[in-house]
Amino acid sequence: MAKRSYTCGFDAAIAVMGGKWKGLILFSLGDGPLRFGELRRSVPGISERMLILQLREMETSGLVHREVYQQVPPKVEYSLTTFGESLNKALAPLGEWGEEHLERIEAIP
């Protein structure tokens, strides 16, 4: 796989974020580790398959850590890495802007 070059920091950040689900997953994990089922319930509308794909991509990019506990039944928790926490912090102002302008955005046809 060829190494990608970016035109600016925003381009790089968007490449890591890709799509609508990753931001919602980051937001959900912001309060601490969650098991898969808890995470799925905290991201309304995401399918199990899509959540699995997004978590794999986020793990590969270093945003999310997957901890597997060797017990019966198996337990897996997902949490943000320091890298993921830093992205979550950077996205917080964007979320605040969205909250502030929610009515106007929802009114857009």
Image (tube, rainbow, N blue to C red):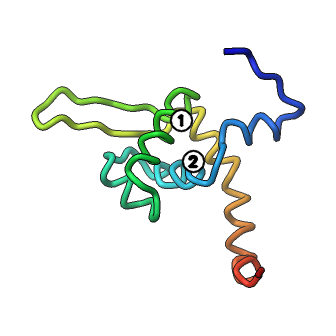
Query: Mark 2 — residue?
Result: 22
Q: Quadrant of the C terminus?
A: bottom right
Task: Name the amino acid type tagged 1.
Answer: Met
Q: Residue 63 placed where, x, y %?
A: 55, 34
Give the structural element (helix, strand or loop) at label 2: helix
| Quarter assignment of residue 100 | bottom right
Mark 1–mark 2 Cα distance, whole angstroms, equals: 8 Å
Left or right of residue 72, residue 44 in this image: right
Residue 77 picture location, percent across and down: 33, 39
For residue 69, what is the image quadrant? top left
53 sits to left or right of 6: left
The correct choice, above or below, for 1 with respect to 33 in the image is above
Q: Residue furthest right?
A: 7
Residue 10 got which mark?
none
For the N terminus, the quadrant is top right
Image check: 93 left or right of 70?
right
Q: Amino acid at mark 2?
A: Lys
Q: Residue furthest top?
A: 2
- Badge 2 crowding class, 10 Å Cα cut-off, few under 14, some 14 to 19, many 20 or more, is some
> What residue is rendered at 36% in x and 60% in y?
41
Badge 1 density bin: few <14, some 14–19, many ≥20, Cα 10 Å:
many
- Please tell me which residue is depicted at 83% across the width and 35% down the height of the picture: 9
| Residue located 71% across and 68% down the image | 98
Q: Are marks 1 and 2 in contact (CB under 8 Å)?
A: yes
Where disc 1 sits, the SS reads helix
Per the image, the residue denoted by label 1 is: 58
